[in-house]
């Protein structure tokens, strides 16, 4: 420490001290100063103390130090996912992993369904992850209650929540639902049904809303006995709902399901009653999960721009980590209708 | 520290010192000693030093200390998964999450495909997780190279590796492959084909080996042009392989696929050429993923006892965390054939 006690002769104005000045004062290389700032263990205790003394003596500018310390990153980004096994989320997780990996970051994942919210929030506070993406996490999440600062490095993906101050990336699900209704009407479908789901999931609520609004505007408001609410988003639930709808109303000619799992079940439910898809009933889903394109289903569905959503979410998160004070960004990307043979393959 | 310098008068035999002795010597409560051992930050610096000095003076037994330190648990268990989006693994992850959650632990997940191996290994060393389950991770894993101590709290699940010293939980895939071959032969299938996969995945290698061995023993050795190796385990790859097999050999009457994704693709590939399943060709898969039971496929397949495997893996891991010195356990559970209509629904 004494070695550099005479370094005060170069005392520059606060805020103008560079790591070059510190290195010179401590009699080490600039690289060594960086290492000390990064807490690199390869630096000997003696050298570390010499550099730390120089930092103090030179009144090394706190903001720069803070920035340097911030660069002591975990290198990992956390993702809290609503449910690991839902195919759409698994696909998005892989896309997030690939994107992060290409940028030199690692991904760490928690399942909200099995208590992942609070460990993720703790990991963020302790610096084990540099930021967190909340994938399809709903408003009831403990993470949101626990981490509600506008400067927290958090991004909501596939969910939007007006009251929450983080950046949010979603897609226009109202428009998506509307597209399906307009498609049905344009092609002469007169007896539409809707298999919906949990209303606390904002994309689901929005899809139903858009679908109902457009039907109503066209003078074909959805009849209450042509609606079923699924509590589980599963194939089985879609299958049973479709059978139940057809038992109640055998003249149905189109069913919109708020996600693809329900729609795949609906197709098999319709077939199990001796009806044909699309000759008797059209089926349209939402999400375009991989198996929707398989021969046995070939499902018409609404596709969210998943890769673009993932890219935006990761970019926003990394920007937020670098600049905690930046203003909130809310992104709502457009969806597209992917027409396949479950609706007769007719063009949009 | 000086306060207890006279405590040497009670020096008990090594290994017999209790936290009561330490508390007495340090002039604090037993609870305070526990807190210091747990690194609880609520203890003042002065008290901490006094207790630490007493621990040293009394030669507090290292094993007991180690045990106490070990009880300072992260509360989280890490899982490194070979590929997040493969449905079988996603299902197993959920089962692990549920089981851990029921026991008061949290799950943290890394995807090996996107560099999860080393962060998981680091997290284990740093105590961020108390133990790690390697789910379907292959011998090329950096984690295995990095964490090869016999006392490390690590369990291999759905993979076995003779040379690796950890506990391992798998199922008898050789027997599973053999069951399928015997089922084909018993029901008069004379022209069998095999769609296989990557040989570095031990379950895949074993399934193929069992299938080939049983065919050979029955005098119906698999012909080389009735074999295709898929590199990707995907629906598309199964579909193309089946089409290719039938183009080469239209008299084929049964195809065994080493996993269900390949088998679902094979069914659609066979149908796309105007053949029927099972009237013309039987198809059998492996894993019994959820969609294999869906109406449009209704796939006969070999089922591993997933829930039992998960329960065993979690129990072994928690036992290993409590007793690092315990001897290695290698578990190989039995599989069963689930007969559905892709093989004509005939009983085993």
Image: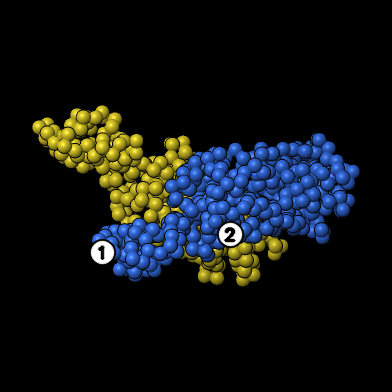
Chain colours: A blue, B yellow
| In front of the other: A60 or A75 | A60
Instruction: Answer left or right for B37 relative to B132.
Output: left
Q: Residue at x 43, y 40 (%)?
A: B105
Residue at 69% x, 46% y: name it: A203
Quarter assignment of residue B210? bottom left
Q: Residues within 10 Å of mark 2 (few under 14, many from 20)?
A: some
Pick whichever of labels 2 and 1 is earlier in the sequence: 1
- Callout 2 and callout 1 share a chain: yes
- The image shows residue A78 at horizontal and vertical percentages of 51, 51
Residue at 59% x, 54% y: name it. A326
Calculate the distance from the C-alpha at mark 2 to the C-alpha at mark 1. 45 Å
Q: Which disc, if any, is residue B43?
A: none
For label 2, the SS is helix
Residue at the left extreme of this rendering: B9
Residue A3 is tagged as 1
Quadrant hosting residue B122: bottom left
Residue pointed to by mark 2: A315
Residue at screen point 24% across, 30% down: B28
Q: Is residue A235 left or right of residue A5?
A: right
Q: Position of residue B198 (x, y in %)?
A: 48, 64
Which of B315 and A69 lies nearest the eye of the viewer?
Answer: A69
Residue A344 visible to an observer of this rendering:
yes
Q: Is residue A1 above or below residue B39?
A: below
Q: Within 10 Å of the Cα at label 1, are there few (<14), some (14-19), or many (20+) other Cα atoms?
A: few
Q: Chain of mark 1?
A: A
Side of B215 where B164 appears, left or right: left
Callout 2 touching callout 1 (CB < 8 Å): no
Residue B73 as seen in the image, left or right of residue B335: left
Dot 1: element: helix
């Amino acid at each position: 420490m004494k070695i550099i006690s005479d370094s005060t002769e170069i005392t520059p104005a606060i805020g103008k001290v560079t790591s070059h000045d510190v290195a010179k004062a401590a009699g080490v290389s600039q690289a060594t100063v960086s290492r000390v700032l990064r807490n690199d263990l390869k630096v000997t205790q003696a050298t570390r103390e010499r550099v730390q003394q120089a930092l103090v003596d030179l009144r090394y500018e706190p903001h720069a130090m803070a920035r340097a310390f911030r660069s002591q990153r975990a290198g990992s980004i956390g993702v809290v996912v609503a449910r690991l096994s839902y195919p759409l989320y698994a696909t998005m997780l892989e896309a997030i992993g690939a994107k992060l990996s290409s940028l030199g970051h690692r991904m760490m994942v928690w399942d909200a369904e099995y208590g992942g919210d609070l460990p993720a929030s703790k990991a963020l506070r302790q610096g084990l992850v540099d930021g967190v993406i909340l994938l399809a996490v709903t408003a009831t999440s403990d993470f949101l209650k626990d981490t509600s600062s506008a400067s927290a490095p958090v991004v909501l993906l596939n969910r939007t929540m007006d009251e929450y101050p983080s950046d949010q990336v979603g897609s226009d699900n109202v428009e998506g639902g509307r597209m399906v209704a307009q498609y049905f009407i344009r092609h002469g479908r007169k007896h539409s049904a809707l298999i919906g789901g949990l209303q606390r999931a904002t994309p689901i609520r929005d899809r139903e809303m858009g679908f109902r609004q457009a039907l109503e505007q066209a003078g074909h408001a959805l009849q209450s006995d042509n609606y079923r609410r699924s509590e589980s988003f599963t194939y089985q639930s879609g299958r049973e709902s479709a059978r139940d709808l057809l038992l109640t109303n055998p003249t149905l000619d189109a069913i919109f399901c708020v996600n693809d799992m329900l729609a795949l079940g609906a197709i098999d439910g319709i077939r199990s009653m001796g009806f044909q898809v699309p000759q008797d009933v059209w089926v349209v889903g939402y999400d375009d999960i991989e198996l929707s394109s398989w021969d046995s289903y070939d499902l018409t569905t609404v596709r969210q721009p998943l890769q673009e959503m993932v890219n935006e979410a990761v970019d926003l998160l990394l920007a937020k980590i670098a600049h905690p004070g930046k203003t909130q960004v809310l992104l709502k990307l457009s969806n597209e209708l992917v027409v396949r043979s479950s609706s007769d393959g007719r063009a949009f």
